[in-house]
Amino acid sequence: MKTAASGLAVLKEALATLDWSALLKDAVIAALVATLLALPLVGFQTYDIGGGALGIRTHFDWVATAAAAVFAGRLALRLQQRLRRGGERRGETLFARLGTWGNRRALPITLVGIAFAVALPFLPFSSRYLIDLGTTVLIYVMLGWGLNVVVGLAGLLDLGYVAFYAVGAYTFALLARDLGLTFWQALPFSGLVAASFGVILGFPVLRLRGDYLAIVTLGFGEIIRIVLLNWSPVTGGPNGISDIPRPSFFGLPFARSAPEGATTFHQFFGLEFSPAQRVTYIYFVILALALVTNLFTSRLRRLPIGRAWEALREDEVACRALGINPTNVKLSAFGIGAMLGGFAGCFFATRQGFISPESFTFIESATILAIVVLGGMGSQMGVVLAALLLVTLPEFGRAFAEFRMLIFGAAMVAIMVWRPRGLLAHREPSLRLHARRSAAL
Amino acid sequence: MTGANEVREPLLLVEHLTMRFGGLTAVHDLSFDAYSREITAIIGPNGAGKTTVFNCLTGFYKPSVGRLMMLVNGEGLLLERMDGFRIVRQAGIARTFQNMRLFAGMTVLENLIVAQHNLLMSASAFSVAGLFGLPRYRSAERAAVERARHWLDKIGLIERADWPAGALPYGAQRRLEIARALCTGPALLCLDEPAAGLNPRESAELNELLLAIRVEERIAILLIEHDMSVVMGISDHIIVLDYGRKIADGPPAAVRVDPNVIKAYLGEDELEKLPKTSAADLHIRR
């Protein structure tokens, strides 16, 4: 290929002009910082020497490894940056190519993805563990799509999204415990109650933007968690609420033996009882919920309300000058985002069968926000990719035991270095005047 | 430029407008009228209070004193009592900004569709009809796209309708912002320095566009401008502000030779040295 040959020439020229001493100095400094950090964190380990006393073990070899890894990584990163400066072109990295390819073939990819998700429980390599993992991924996908309305479309940085997740979960748990409602009966109420909480949060933060908004929403998330923790008579405090009913299949419960006068799922269909049936069913429930969420939000994006959200993100003053009421637009974004979080929370409660405030800490909000940001703000497909990555990466890392968070962190850094605007940062217009041209950027 | 036999109909009546920010009086006791189907220009040196007048008219500021009345179908609407975002819909006043405020990440077409938000929102029955794709909403959306296409054609951006607005060249962004304001269906279009940063050719095109808006669409224009070729070339009526006070008000020919105006732009000493200068000849620093 001609371009490859000329690219090689450019590379040679760039290599010749490199300032090696500066590069090495930079890498050495990075390695020193890594040593300083690794020494107390990795260098020493306490262990039980019997009789309740602790001994100390040193791991200076690990510190050396960390320093060497940082040295090599920093050097490689710098080299890559310098070499690209000559002929810098966007769309060179793997993910950029993946992104443009994904946008060209959005429909077939979506269909294949859905088909795979539907077939997953029946594939030969499938296991209960895999279906459980799939369920977790789908919860985060749904939460990501919900938060995407608030953060990606309306541009309102929300660090307390988990509050709505918690409100949805507790709404269902309380309705089931006190009024005996089933999952399907309680689902709309969970969404409704969470949406009202979204609007309640929306009012005081109408005038806030950016960092200030983030701080208030962060506080709101903590308020909800602390109320749940301390309002023991209602929420059970730290003990949480247990025995939350499982979802039924059109009134058919998934149980070994049916209560008086009822038929169970396996009896009705004449199947052998297996706990896997319930796990698979729960997987399909969240798959359906997530797909409805996607349909709903991508539809909204193409409606005046969705365009108003995006316009608000771009310029609030201009919105007002065009006769758009920013109050309504913000509250609708908060309300709808919260409602979707509430649905997800309701599902979470029925899946776990037990909820406590511990499930709704700030780290959950951070994970959901990371999914939206990593995926590329406003990108539906990006959320799926990021949720897959963020949920499965720590799972695959299990083999490395105590290093798995390190690997996770390194992956996050790598993504932000190479794709600062998210994995699939591409905005598809909500409507077009001309048919799409292949050369369109 | 209005025909002699045509009766001038007042559209906007500004009476005793005063705007104070703490101890600073940005606009002092300003009264003027703007007439329908006319281009009214507000000029004045930097800091004269021109943009403040605009911000009062479009609801971004609440005036300290004064009455702002817009005549809609013979009825007077008091702008100072309305919420900012209602002024477009009810009084029909649309505006552009001195330092453009486009939705840069959205496409050109989307910018024009967002401007028709209220219309589409009620057609979509607050998203319910839109969510299910009912024909009522679909036809409303089609009409909105047609209106956008009409203006895109006028400003020569139909080819680039699907570009992100931020990717357009500067002059095109200026024109797009005017088209976006027009898509709200206004009776009065307020333009805050539309020719700022344009080259002479673009500036001439802008003049043509503004005249076309006035003649073909019969929309009145209220204009803040520094570019004298724009102001003198197309205005029917010029109001000159200096330190928040009105120092002249009249047709371009009269304002051009008004000694007060020349004094405000040049200063008293220079005026004595250059007795024959007219305001239009002066190059005014932005």
Image (cartoon, rainbow, N blue to C red):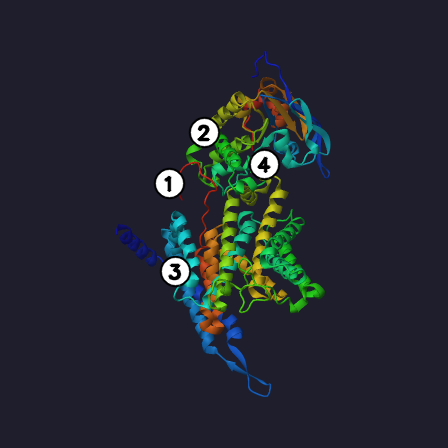
Give the image quarter of residue B46: top right
The residues bearing labels 3 and 4 have C-alpha atoms spaced at a distance of: 56 Å
The answer to whether residue A310 is above or below residue A424 is above
| Residue at mark 1 | A437
- Is the residue under label 4 in contact with that under label 2 (CB below 8 Å)? no
Residue A111 visible in the current orientation = yes
Give the image quarter of residue A74: bottom left
Which residue is at a point 46% across and 61% down the rendered structure image?
Answer: A389
Of helix, strand and loop, which one carries label 2? helix
| Residue at mark 3 | A79
Q: Earlier in the sequence, mark 2 or mark 4?
A: 4
- Is the residue under label 3 in contact with that under label 2 (CB below 8 Å)? no
Q: Quadrant of the C terminus of chain A?
A: top left
| Residue at mark 2 | B153
Residue A127 screen position, x and y as percent: 44, 68
The residues bearing labels 2 and 3 have C-alpha atoms spaced at a distance of: 49 Å
**Chain identifier of the residue bearing label 2 in the image:** B
